[in-house]
Each structure stands twice: as structure tokens, then as C-alpha cells.
């Protein structure tokens, strides 16, 4: 005997439709409705009818084979045969994270296609594969951040079975898996949650509309919905970690914040499973309470993306001063973030026009994920340009060197490791033509405000925008891509080999710089990272170079003297004591 249940606290009548049959459901406590039936078995299609209206997909649908508007399908998680019972993920402190988008990572654009590249990732030195959101979203192509069926893996990618097969294969190769989840909003198409109950509130607003109701009347079951979703990915899909999108838009003034409750319940699950689990937040707040332990008044999230590091490094390499980059652009910013964890840690932000952030004192660099590129920082540019499209090859090398030698957990974005020529653009596939038009016009007007010709902005709805963003794996063996790939491979191996580079104690990192000469020296234990970010060659003073040798250099012929090192323009070298 199987059963179906749904939360619809204000409904007078709820029916379940299984196949072509309709059954009245029984009301239970706290607004839940239940049906026991032998028809509620694995693979059966079903939907819910609230108040006599049209059938709707289950808010907690585990399987949506016909897309966001189609019926749900019952899934028995116990039917998949896992082979990873002895698996434990590597600690975050030793992680090399690789962020990928399933639809553009391979020509197939599926979980099965991604599985074919696991040997490549392993050989590169990757330890953790981070998947952009894979829950069901509108149409066949998209970034996944406008998902609506949060419990159901996207069918076009391979559905529940395909995702489990990919995760199992990753674990067989020794690769941990991080899944990107979105709990601050749902997509605009196929979002039926409001038809079932008070999942949203107008007391707050987000960039995407109404906020999720996490602290108002009847919010207990709404919180339960999202926390159960997180636990499902970790338990039933064997994910090793979750990356939580835009936590600054998770609006909650409860005494126990949603993130704190989530961290506590994940800890509980970890003890039950006997497998290490962790959470990574994306936060625009620079509020280090997110990653401080609960015992010290924090939320207990394990790590967060370090936006200040990305912005400081990007601005130093490119000279960009648009938008939030106006707060960066000096080597002093880069020096501060490398030694203090954040640039804006309670100081005035010109871009925000107020004091921003909180001190990271006492935190480990291993609680921050640092990168030069990610899906946002590439895809939210007008044409999806990568750093390799903007600066010289040697500046790309310098930026990569700082990512892999910084006291943070390094992350790269798909194709970054070979300087992929393909962009990563913003693409959607909304079936509603009015919504598609609104997305297209909104994208163009957004960049027109920055002086772009609207006609030059790629159409998110156009199929070619999606195909343009697919990686071209044929170029990996060609120059200059092969050279950049070997540089990344060498940096990853260097980080693995030298314990000082994995030491998260930021107080053990020191940085000297000359703003005018555009040179920077970072010392991490017995390792020196020397950067000449100027266009012209120059001698970089480095007292105490006796006994140091170059272990990696972006240009041949760089050799240290006792008190300095001559470097060509846009060059970087890593030195270590003998």
C-alpha cells in the first residue's frame, strides 16, 4: 500500500488523481492531506486537485517527466543500487572545486554526458564537482535558477536515475559532488506553490518578486519544505554538499534563522549517515555570522563564496570600474582580502554608499571559496565573456596563480582551465511567449543602461545563445589552450604538494605591494608568489631570496638574485625554499 500526501492548509477539499482515477484525500494535522492506495506505486503518474480546480503537479514532486506543467510521477528511491557505501568526501580544506552547467558542459548536455568527462576532471586534480541547479525548470535549457519543482531532477538532463548514476560515478572516481540549490525564490513559470498554501509573503520583496514565507503565519511547513529538500539531496541522491544561492535574499527574522536550522539538521543527518556533509553559502552581505559556529552566535554554515576576493582580483587584472567594481581596483584591496579575508569588513563602500560587512577575524581561509570566474561573473556580462577574452594570456596565468595560492578554497568554472573560446551567456527556454519576450526585453534594457546597443545583446530565448555557450572540447589540445591547461594542472599539483598553500590561517599570509609599479608579493610559509601586473618588465625587489628557487613561472628565463627578481610584463612566479 502506497500513499500520497500534500500540504494545503486552507483547502476545503483535496483530491488525488492517479492515472485517470480521482480519489478524495483525508485531512490530517497541520493542514496535511493524505491518501493511501495500492495505485500509489513507483512509476505511477499523479496530480492534486485543490478546491475542484485543474490537476496540479505535486509541490514535492520527485519526478516530472513531462515538464513543469505535467503530472508528477511517484519515485521509490530504494530502487537505485548505490555502490558508494564506503565513500567519504575529501575535506573542504583540501578541495579543488570545478563548477559546471550540465547542459553546456558536454555536447550531450546530460548527466550521462558529464559522466564521460570524470576521468578528465580527476586527471586535472579536481576533488569536488559543483553542479549548477538541476531541479526541473521551464523548457529544456536554462541556468536552473528559475526552477519550480525543487525535488525533481530535470528530465532533459536525465531525470532522477541519471543524476544518481552521475553521483555514483563521481564517487567511484573519488570525486565529491556539490549541488547548487535555490531557496530564495522560485521561477516565474510553473510555480504552483501559492495554489496550495502560504509559501510566499508580501511583507518582503526580492529581485524576483514575493519572498518565501519563512517567518510569518503558517511558515513552519514552508521552512520544512525547503529543509526537507536539502536533506533529500544529501540523503537520497548522496550529494556531499550544497551550495545555497543568494542567502542574502532568504529573508527571515525568526529567532532561529532558516540557515541556522538548516545547518543543525544537516549536522543531524551527517551523524545518521556516517558521512561528512557540508554547506556553502553565496552571500552579498559580507556578514561573517553566516559561517561562524552556532556556539559563537553564527549560523554554522561551513563556508561561503568570497565575492570580495573575486572582485579585487578581477578589477586588478582588468581595470574594470563599472558597478560594484568601483569599490575595487587597487592592489591594496587584493592585499587586504588575502590577509584579512574580506575587503569590506565594516568599512565604507562607495558603490553601496554605506558601511558594509563584518570582520572575518578568527575565521579560516578554508571557510571562503575563492575564484577568478564563476557562472555569475561570466554569464552576467553582456556577452558572457570569460577573463581570457578580456586580458592577456599571461594575466590569465597570474590570476589563476593567485587563486590557487591564496588562503581560500580554489574554484574554477568549466572551461576556465584551458581558456575556453566559447562564452557562457544567459539563456532561457520559457514556453510562455509573453514571459520569453519580457526576459528578452529586460536583458536588453538592463545593458542598454550601461551604453550597450540592445541589438548586440544575445537573445536569452534564442536556441543559438545556448549552443554558443557549449564548451568546445576539440580546442583543449590546441594552442594557446593546451598551454593554459598545463598551467592550471601545474598550479593544482603545486597546491596539492605544498602544505603551506592549503593552510587556511590567514595570519600566516603576508603581502607586500607597490601600487604605482603594479607589483605584488605574497608570502605563504616557505612559498613566495611574485606578480608583475604591469605591462612592462621590471625588477621586483625581494629581500631574502637566498635559498629560494622557482618552482613555477609563467615565462621562461625568470631567475631570482639574492635581493630581487627581474620579470617581464604580466608575469608571475612561485618560489619555494630548498
Image: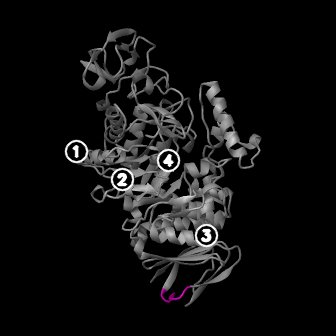
The crowding category of the residue bearing disc 1, from other C-alpha atoms within 10 Å (few below 14, some 14 to 19, many at least 20), is: few
- Above-or-below relation of 135 to 96: above
Residue on which the image places disc 1: 272
Most prominent secondary structure in the magenta stretch? loop
Q: Nearer the viewer, residue 144 or 477?
A: 144
Q: Position of residue 157 (x, y in %)?
A: 49, 34
Kind of element beneath mark 4 = loop
Residue on which the image places disc 4: 117
Lower position in the chain sequence, tag 1 or tag 2: 1
Q: Which residues are magenta?
A: 542-547
Q: Residue furthest top?
A: 21
Gap in angstroms between the C-alphas marked 1 and 4:
32 Å
Lower position in the chain sequence, tag 1 or tag 3: 1
Q: Nearer the viewer, residue 174 or 242?
A: 242
Gap in angstroms between the C-alphas marked 2 and 3:
30 Å
Lower position in the chain sequence, tag 1 or tag 4: 4
Residue on which the image places disc 3: 330
- Above-or-below relation of 300 to 186: below
Kind of element beneath mark 1 = helix
The crowding category of the residue bearing disc 2, from other C-alpha atoms within 10 Å (few below 14, some 14 to 19, many at least 20), is: many
Q: Residue at x 67, y 35 (%)?
A: 440
Closer to the camera: disc 1 or disc 3?
Answer: 3
Gap in angstroms between the C-alphas marked 1 and 3:
48 Å
Q: Which mark is residue 301?
A: 2
Gap in angstroms between the C-alphas marked 1 and 2:
19 Å
Gap in angstroms between the C-alphas marked 3 and 4:
38 Å
Amino acid at each position: 500500500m502506497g500513499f500520497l500526501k500534500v500540504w494545503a492548509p486552507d483547502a476545503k477539499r483535496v483530491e488525488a488523481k492517479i492515472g485517470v482515477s480521482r480519489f478524495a484525500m483525508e485531512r490530517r494535522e497541520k493542514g496535511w492531506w493524505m491518501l493511501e492506495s495500492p495505485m500509489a506505486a513507483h512509476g505511477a503518474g499523479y496530480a492534486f486537485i485543490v478546491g475542484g480546480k485543474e490537476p496540479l503537479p505535486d509541490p514535492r514532486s520527485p519526478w516530472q517527466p513531462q515538464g513543469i506543467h505535467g503530472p508528477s510521477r511517484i519515485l521509490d528511491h530504494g530502487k537505485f543500487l548505490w555502490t558508494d557505501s564506503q565513500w567519504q568526501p575529501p575535506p573542504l580544506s583540501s578541495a579543488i572545486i570545478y563548477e559546471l552547467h550540465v547542459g553546456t558542459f558536454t555536447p550531450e548536455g546530460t548527466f550521462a554526458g558529464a559522466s564521460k568527462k570524470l576521468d578528465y576532471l580527476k586527471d586535472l586534480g579536481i576533488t569536488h564537482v559543483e553542479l549548477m541547479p538541476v531541479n526541473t525548470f521551464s523548457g529544456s535549457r536554462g541556468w536552473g535558477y528559475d526552477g519550480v519543482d525543487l525535488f525533481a531532477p530535470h528530465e532533459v538532463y536525465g531525470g532522477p536515475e541519471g543524476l544518481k548514476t552521475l553521483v555514483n560515478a563521481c564517487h567511484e572516481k573519488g570525486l565529491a559532488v556539490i549541488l547548487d540549490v535555490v531557496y530564495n525564490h522560485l521561477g516565474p513559470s510553473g510555480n504552483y506553490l501559492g495554489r496550495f498554501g502560504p509559501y510566499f509573503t508580501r511583507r518582503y520583496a526580492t529581485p524576483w518578486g514575493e519572498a518565501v514565507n519563512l517567518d510569518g503565519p503558517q511558515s513552519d511547513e514552508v521552512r520544512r519544505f525547503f529543509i526537507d529538500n536539502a536533506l533529500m539531496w544529501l540523503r537520497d541522491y548522496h550529494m556531499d554538499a550544497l551550495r545555497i544561492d543568494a542567502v542574502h535574499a532568504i529573508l527571515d527574522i525568526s529567532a532561529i534563522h532558516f540557515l541556522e536550522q538548516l545547518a543543525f539538521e544537516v549536522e543531524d543527518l551527517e551523524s545518521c549517515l556516517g558521512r561528512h556533509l557540508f554547506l556553502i553559502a553565496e552571500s552579498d552581505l559580507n556578514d561573517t555570522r553566516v559561517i561562524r559556529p552556532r556556539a559563537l552566535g553564527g549560523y554554522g554554515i561551513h563556508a561561503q563564496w568570497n565575492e570580495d576576493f573575486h572582485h579585487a582580483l578581477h578589477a586588478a587584472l582588468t581595470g574594470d570600474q563599472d558597478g560594484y567594481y568601483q569599490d575595487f581596483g587597487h592592489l591594496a584591496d587584493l592585499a587586504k582580502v588575502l590577509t584579512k579575508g574580506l575587503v569590506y569588513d565594516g568599512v565604507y563602500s562607495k558603490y553601496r554608499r554605506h558601511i558594509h560587512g563584518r570582520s572575518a577575524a578568527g575565521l579560516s581561509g578554508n571557510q571562503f571559496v575563492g575564484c577568478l570566474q564563476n557562472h555569475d561573473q561570466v554569464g552576467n556580462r553582456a556577452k558572457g565573456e570569460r577573463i581570457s577574452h578580456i586580458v592577456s594570456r599571461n594575466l590569465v596565468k597570474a590570476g589563476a596563480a593567485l587563486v590557487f595560492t591564496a588562503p581560500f578554497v580554489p574554484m574554477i568554472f568549466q572551461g576556465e582551465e584551458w581558456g575556453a573560446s566559447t562564452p557562457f551567456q544567459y539563456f532561457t527556454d520559457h514556453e510562455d511567449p509573453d514571459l520569453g519576450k519580457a526576459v528578452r526585453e529586460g536583458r536588453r534594457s538592463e545593458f542598454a543602461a550601461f551604453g550597450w546597443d540592445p541589438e548586440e545583446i544575445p537573445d536569452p530565448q534564442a536556441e543559438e545563445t545556448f549552443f554558443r555557450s557549449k564548451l568546445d572540447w576539440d580546442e583543449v589540445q590546441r594552442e594557446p589552450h593546451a598551454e593554459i591547461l598545463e598551467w592550471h594542472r601545474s598550479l593544482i599539483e603545486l597546491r596539492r604538494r605544498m602544505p603551506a598553500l592549503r593552510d587556511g590561517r590567514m595570519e600566516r599570509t603576508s603581502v607586500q605591494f607597490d601600487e604605482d609599479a603594479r607589483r605584488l608579493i605574497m608570502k605563504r610559509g616557505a612559498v613566495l608568489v611574485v606578480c608583475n601586473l604591469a605591462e612592462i618588465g621590471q625588477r621586483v625587489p625581494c629581500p631574502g631570496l637566498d635559498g629560494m628557487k622557482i618552482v613555477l613561472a609563467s615565462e621562461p628565463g625568470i631567475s631570482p638574485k639574492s635581493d630581487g627578481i627581474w620579470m617581464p610584463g604580466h608575469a608571475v612566479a612561485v618560489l619555494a625554499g630548498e
